[in-house]
Each structure stands twice: as structure tokens, then as C-alpha cells.
Image (cartoon, rainbow, N blue to C red):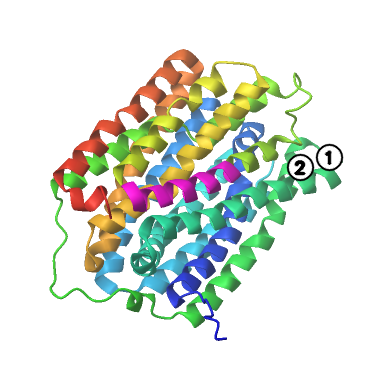
């Protein structure tokens, strides 16, 4: 009896391989994110400085994506842009181990270099992914990549936790510096696997057929409403650097559960939630479009209340979980929506505009949240929740302008 052998398409193999590259990349920089806020604080940075630098890094990392998106569309050098960006990204993180005591200015500079690496790679990388995703389902494809991404984001902080278990001598600052040095290992794996993927798939743009006629990218109403929506979402979405600084101030020394050693595990948990929510909402997006955006935004909007308004460990865990859901939506559904609205020949520019706006408003929001944290935590919580909820009517307006883009891709 003849049995039909199921096999993965070449497009899906590319998506998975690229996802494994992202896994090791996320091990590197998300491992760093789990202790970055505390590390900057130990180096002498204030809460306002941490909020400002986190936001400035996002501003540079996102606003420059428009420039590099335009450059990528013009040159079609998808792989060179991706590779150069990855090298900057994963090399800047372990270099944080070299900053000495009171070296917060140097550390901030390295964090900005890391964000510049992301700015260079992201439009090209997301465009390469979108070519393969068109035939496999945009929501599902970006969801699968995000799952692999977040497995790395889970393993990175977990690796640092193991390092801390064995590295028990020295100051907390010294132990954290050793942790950053260990992040060179997944960084090296990222670069090696990236070249392996390129050698296997030198021309991923061939996955998506060329359009019959050229359509120059124009800012249609549905895209303008969508960009406005994601900008409100970004403004209200508090950066994890501020969260981890608050948690270390509030719980370390007062809780047997949250300690300087277990702190990275909190971020690992958030990344697991991120992974599962990305896949769930990615599939939802392929089935019901804008409803997935509304659901993910509504669910995650109140994370700040549970994290900052209480000293309860269970409520902190709930808030971190909701924050993870917001991250999952940001990395999968929001990107999938761009691929359904922007034509192939202009997609890197479309991603550049999307991420530039996202970064500008993340910068402004992070800066404001850092200032409000010192002045009034209640005001910070209110601004965060209201800004994120403001995104929902704009998503709906975007869908109404052109139902073919968001209601059912």
C-alpha cells in the first residue's frame, strides 16, 4: 500500500532555519536584557537615565530602520544587510563585560551600538522572512519564528542563572560582567548558523512570485491608521529595563522568591509566554485578521498595574505574563499585518516605516515612563494603559479602510 510521505516545503525549512538563527541571537541579547537594567543601576545610572537610554536605544534602533529599509529596497542586498546587522548586534552584548566600575556611559554606548545592529538587519531580515511567509501564511510563519526566537530568549536568561549558580564569589557587578562574557557563546553560534542558512538559501526572494505590474509604495489610509495604532501601543509599552530595575528595588532583600540570582528566570518566564502567545495570535491573525490585534492589545494593556501597583509576587508574575503577551503580539502579528499591506518590491521600506514609528514612540514613552516612575507610579500606570488601549480603535479604522488587508489576509 502506497503511503504519502509528508515533507516540509523549502519555504518552511527556510523559516525554521532563520528561526534557529534568531534563537541564538535572542539568547545573546535577551539574556542581556534580563539583567541590563540592574547592571546599569550597579554601574551608577539613575532610573531616569535607564529609561532615557533604553528609549534612545529603541529610537535609534527603530528610526534608522526606515533609512536601511529604503536602502535595502534600492539595492536588494538582503543578505549583506542582514549579516552585517547581526554581527554588530551579537558582538556589542558580550563587550558589556569589559565596562569597569562606574562605566555606565560606556555600557550605554554599547547598548546603542547593539540597537544600531538591529536597525541595519531588521528590515532586510523581515523582508526575507515575508517572501517565504506569503506562501505559508503570514501570521503562522511569523508566529513560528517568534516561538523559536523566544525559546532563545528563555534559554539566554536561564544560561545566566546557571552561570550565577556556579559563580558565587565576587561582587554582584563582577558576577554580572561574567554573565555578559558568557553571552559570546550564543553570539558566535548566531553568526555561524546565519552563514549556513545563506549558503542553503541564497535567494529567498524567489519564494514569492514577482508581481505582474509594479506598484510603488504609497501611504494609504489603512496603513496610516495602522501605523498610528502601533505607535500608541509602543508609547504605552514599558521597556523591561525599567521593569527589572523596579523588581530589583522592590523585591530583592524582601522576598525569598525574587533574588539577584533568580532575577533572570523572571525574564525567561516572560519569554515563554511571548513564544506561545505569538503562535496563538499568529494563527488567529490568519483566521480572523484585526480581531487578533484587538485581543492581544486588550489583554496586555494592564500589565503595568500588576507589576508596579503591588508588592505581591503572584500579581507580579501575572503582570510579567501579560507583558509577555504584548511582546508576542508585537513580534508576530504586527509584522504579519505589514506583509499583507505592502507590495513585495517596497516591503523593506514598509517595514522601515513601521519600525521607525514604533521606535520613536517607544523612545518617547520609555523616557516619560522613567520620569513618571520617579514622580508618580500611579500616573505612569495610567498613561501606559490608556496609550495601549488607544491603539484598538485605530486598528479597527485600518481594517474598515481596506478589509482585504486586515480582516482576512
Q: Quadrant of the C terminus?
A: bottom left
Q: Which quarter of the figure has residue 256?
A: top right
Q: Quadrant of the N terminus?
A: bottom right
Q: Residue at x 55, y 86 (%)?
A: 2
Q: Residue furthest front?
A: 1
Q: Residue at x 78, y 48 (%)?
A: 163
Horizontal placement of 5 versus 405: left or right? right
Task: Measure the C-alpha gap from mark 2 to mark 1.
Answer: 6 Å
The answer, for residue 360, to whether it is visible in the render is no
By secondary structure, the bulk of the magenta-drawn segment is best described as helix
Query: Could you say whether the residue bearing mark 1 is in a helix, strand or loop?
Result: loop
Magenta segment, which residues? 271-288
For label 2, the residue is 174
Q: Residue at x 58, y 48 (%)?
A: 30
For label 1, the residue is 170
Closer to the camera in the image, 158 or 400: 400
Amino acid at each position: 500500500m502506497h503511503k504519502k510521505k509528508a515533507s516540509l516545503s523549502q519555504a518552511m525549512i527556510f523559516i525554521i532555519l532563520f528561526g534557529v538563527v534568531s534563537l541564538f541571537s535572542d539568547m545573546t541579547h535577551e539574556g542581556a536584557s534580563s539583567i541590563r537594567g540592574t547592571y546599569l543601576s550597579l554601574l551608577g545610572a539613575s532610573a531616569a537615565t535607564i529609561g532615557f537610554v533604553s528609549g534612545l536605544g529603541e529610537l535609534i534602533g527603530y528610526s534608522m530602520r526606515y533609512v536601511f529599509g529604503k536602502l535595502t529596497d534600492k539595492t536588494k542586498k538582503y543578505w549583506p544587510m542582514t549579516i552585517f546587522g547581526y554581527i554588530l548586534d551579537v558582538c556589542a552584548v558580550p563587550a558589556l563585560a569589559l565596562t569597569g566600575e562606574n562605566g555606565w556611559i560606556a555600557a550605554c554606548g554599547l547598548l546603542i551600538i547593539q540597537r544600531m545592529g538591529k536597525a541595519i538587519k531588521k528590515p532586510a531580515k523581515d523582508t526575507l522572512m515575508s517572501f517565504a511567509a506569503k506562501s505559508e501564511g503570514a501570521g503562522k510563519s511569523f508566529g513560528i519564528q517568534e516561538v523559536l526566537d523566544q525559546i532563545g530568549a528563555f534559554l539566554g536568561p536561564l544560561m545566566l542563572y546557571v552561570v550565577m549558580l556556579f559563580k558565587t564569589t565576587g561582587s554582584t557587578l563582577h558576577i554580572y560582567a561574567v554573565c555578559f562574557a558568557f553571552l559570546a557563546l550564543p553570539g558566535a553560534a548566531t553568526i555561524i548558523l546565519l552563514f549556513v542558512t545563506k549558503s542553503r538559501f541564497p535567494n529567498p526572494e524567489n519564494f514569492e512570485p514577482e508581481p505582474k505590474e509594479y506598484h510603488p509604495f504609497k501611504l494609504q489610509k489603512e496603513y496610516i491608521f495602522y501605523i498610528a495604532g502601533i505607535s500608541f501601543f509602543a508609547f504605552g509599552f514599558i521597556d523591561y529595563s525599567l521593569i527589572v530595575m523596579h523588581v530589583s528595588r522592590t523585591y530583592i532583600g524582601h522576598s525569598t522568591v525574587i533574588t539577584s540570582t533568580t532575577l533572570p528566570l523572571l525574564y525567561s518566564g516572560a519569554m515563554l509566554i511571548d513564544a506561545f502567545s505569538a503562535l496563538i495570535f499568529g494563527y488567529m491573525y490568519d483566521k480572523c485578521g484585526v480581531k487578533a490585534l484587538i485581543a492581544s492589545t486588550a489583554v496586555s494593556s494592564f500589565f503595568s498595574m500588576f507589576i508596579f501597583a503591588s508588592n505581591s509576587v503572584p500579581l507580579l508574575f501575572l503582570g510579567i505574563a501579560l507583558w509577555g503577551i504584548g511582546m508576542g503580539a508585537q513580534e508576530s502579528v504586527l509584522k504579519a499585518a505589514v506583509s499583507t499591506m505592502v507590495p513585495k518590491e517596497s516591503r523593506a521600506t514598509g517595514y522601515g516605516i513601521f519600525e521607525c514609528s514604533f521606535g520613536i514612540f517607544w523612545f518617547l514613552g520609555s523616557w516619560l515612563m522613567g520620569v513618571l516612575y520617579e514622580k508618580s507610579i500611579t500616573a505612569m500606570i495610567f498613561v501606559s494603559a490608556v496609550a495601549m488601549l488607544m491603539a484598538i480603535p485605530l486598528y479597527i479604522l485600518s481594517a474598515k479602510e481596506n478589509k482585504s488587508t486586515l480582516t482576512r489576509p
